[in-house]
Image: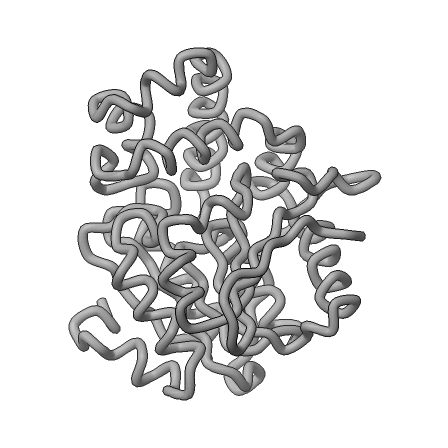
């Protein structure tokens, strides 16, 4: 399957994978900075942006298989990857399969338990229903700091600081993703994420987490790190579900460090107080 994608900059390739309801534009807050150092490839996942849905079911694992097939077709196996939310879970799964190189997973989904599953599903489903209802007013709402604060409070620790253009693009893409409802249900209630035993992942792997994440609660970070025991855990202060929104400069520094020549351990320990909780 062809995935709509863009390429920016030059150097060692770096793949960015967005979350549910997002598009390649989700990475705009950090794209130029990354492209100053790397060739950055952004994709629209199936059923998102300019990539059509898959024939049949559009589950998390079906989308992941499609990305893996696309990487093989593009001769990009072993590429360094960064993922956000669902995309972060996807790059973890690709790392588990040995398909990609160094990985930074930002607030991955899939590590919720018990009541957190219901919270994730119903809170996100409710947010999207609200967005669909107010879509004609989204442009006006996102140009206003109060409007951004109300609409993005679940996703950002400082929603009033999210640029209006970023907020509008992301919220509109949530509304216009045709497979959103199907995929959301699968993420919450579908097949669970497998982990990877220690020593099975040979490339640097860092899981980053915002301390104020209200979508994937910080307690889930420990489960993710336990499931992927080769990973280092990195904490973003004053940060919600999207570090590239709330801490863009720090996010770029982490990505370049982890996917460069430094080891994941050294990258995740600077500053040291953020490497462990």
Q: Position of residue 75 (x, y in %)?
A: 74, 73
Left or right: 123 as drawn, with respect to 93: left
- Of residues 189 and 211, the one nearer the viewer is 211
Disc count in the image? 0
Vertical comparison of 14 with 264: above or below: above
Q: Residue at image x 38%, y 20%?
A: 139
Left or right? Give the position of 10 relative to 152.
Answer: right
Image vertical order of residue 111 relative to residue 99, above or below? above
Residue 195, percent from left and from top: 55, 68
88 relative to 138, above or below: below
Q: Is residue 71 left or right of residue 153?
A: right
Q: Residue at 26% of width from left, 61% of height from top?
A: 249
Most extreme residue toward the right is 55
Which scheme is used to colour this image of the protein?
Answer: one colour
Q: Tell me the residue at 53%/32% (across/down).
A: 173
Residue 276, compared with residue 178, is above or below; it is below
The quadrant holding residue 30 is: bottom left
Identify the residue at image location x=49%, y=27%. Answer: 172
Question: To which quarter of the image does residue 146 belong?
Answer: top left
Q: Is residue 82 left or right of residue 162?
A: right
The one nearer the camera, 248 or 61, is 248
> Can you tell which quarter of the image residue 275 is in?
bottom left
Q: Position of residue 36 (x, y in %)?
A: 40, 68
* Residue 153 picture location, percent across and down: 28, 32
**In what quadrant of the picture does the C terminus appear?**
bottom left
């Amino acid at each position: 399957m062809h995935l709509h994608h863009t390429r920016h900059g030059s150097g060692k390739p770096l793949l960015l994978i967005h979350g549910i309801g997002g598009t390649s534009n989700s990475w705009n807050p950090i794209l130029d900075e990354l492209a100053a150092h790397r060739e950055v490839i952004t994709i629209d996942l199936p059923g998102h942006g300019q990539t059509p849905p898959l024939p049949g079911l559009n589950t998390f694992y079906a989308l992941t298989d499609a990305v893996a097939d696309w990487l093989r077709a593009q001769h990009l196996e072993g590429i360094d990857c960064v993922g956000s939310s669902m995309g972060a879970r996807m790059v973890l799964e690709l790392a588990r399969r040995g398909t990609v190189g160094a990985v930074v997973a930002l607030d991955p989904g899939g590590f919720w338990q018990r009541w957190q599953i219901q919270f994730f599903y119903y809170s996100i489903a409710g947010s999207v229903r609200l967005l669909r209802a107010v879509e004609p007013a989204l442009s006006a709402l996102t140009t206003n700091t109060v409007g951004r604060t109300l609409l993005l409070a679940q996703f950002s620790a400082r929603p009033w600081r999210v640029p209006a253009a970023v907020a509008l693009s992301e919220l509109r893409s949530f509304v216009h993703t045709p497979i959103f409802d199907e995929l959301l249900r699968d993420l919450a209630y579908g097949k669970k994420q497998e982990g990877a035993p220690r020593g099975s992942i040979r490339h640097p792997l860092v899981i980053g987490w915002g301390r104020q994440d209200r979508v994937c609660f910080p307690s889930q970070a420990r489960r993710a790190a336990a499931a992927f025991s080769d990973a280092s855990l990195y904490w973003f202060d004053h940060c919600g579900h999207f570090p590239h929104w709330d801490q863009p400069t720090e996010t770029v520094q982490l990505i370049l460090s982890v996917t460069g020549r430094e080891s994941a351990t050294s990258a995740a320990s600077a500053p040291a107080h953020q490497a462990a909780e």
